[in-house]
Amino acid sequence: MLLMTVIVGIRVKAQEYRTDPECILFIAQNPIDGDPPCNDYCDALIIENGYNCTFGNPGGQFDLDNLDNSELLERTNVFGFDLGPADKAFPRLVRLVMFAMLSFVGLASMGYGFYGAYVRSTALDSPDKVELANKIFKNAVLGVLIAFGGVIILQILALVIGIEDNLTSFNVIPKRGNFVSITREDVENGFCLEEQLGYLDTGGGTEDEYRCEDGRWIPN
């Protein structure tokens, strides 16, 4: 009986709050300059009744459909990704594009290296093929070094211009909202905004709560 009571209690607690898909979609499509009007994590009863909860208060009920659209301020939005205010949107976009290009260079270099291994394995006693394979290896290594060095340079520049807080953080676009759902990878490597609370699904209907401290997720 005691065990059943504990299990039921855990399930009830887990059902008190849940993500609000309408709010998440609203934030993605209508980013605003500052805090969003709604929480992406909300009281389950409010969501079931067709309402939303106000930002910073998962129990504060209001109707998102009746929001005054004049409150929305222009921000840079690319394919549904909020890049933030204009002064930091362009550097974030450039960084995103550069990361994609460097990733391609790195992958292509690795593939080129595998090709070099194939050429070397079929060279037998052919000096020309051996020389070609060695040249391919050198170019592949150079490509990997260029990609790796480019990432480091991008991270240093991100620190200098203030769109990143440390060299090991690769979050181009941090999650928005006061209450957000996070993953284990977010906890280990993710970037967060001050006063955010994160909820990690641990399975079995339970969640671990985290708070944002100095840009990192800390167990609450």
Image (spheres, rainbow, N blue to C red):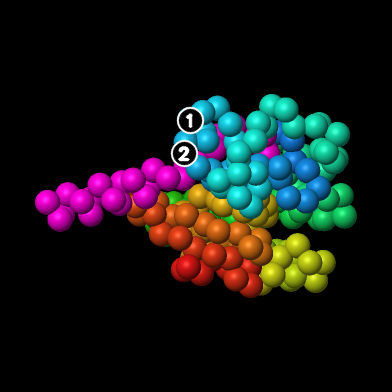
Could one spot residue 118 in this view of the protein? yes
140 left or right, relative to 173: left
Secondary structure mostly seen in the magenta stretch: helix
Residue beneath disc 1? 48
* Residue 35: mark in rendering: none
Circle 2/circle 1 CB separation < 8 Å: yes
Q: Position of residue 119 (x, y in %)?
A: 47, 52
Is 15 part of what is drawn in magenta? yes
Residue type at mark 1?
Answer: Glu
The foreground one among 183 and 11 is 11
Q: Which residues are magenta?
A: 1-28
Res 151 quadrant in image: bottom right
Residue type at mark 2?
Answer: Ala
Q: Position of residue 41 (x, y in %)?
A: 54, 45
Is 33 part of what is drawn in magenta? no
Residue beneath disc 2? 44
Name the residue rendered at 64%, 52% in the picture.
Answer: 56
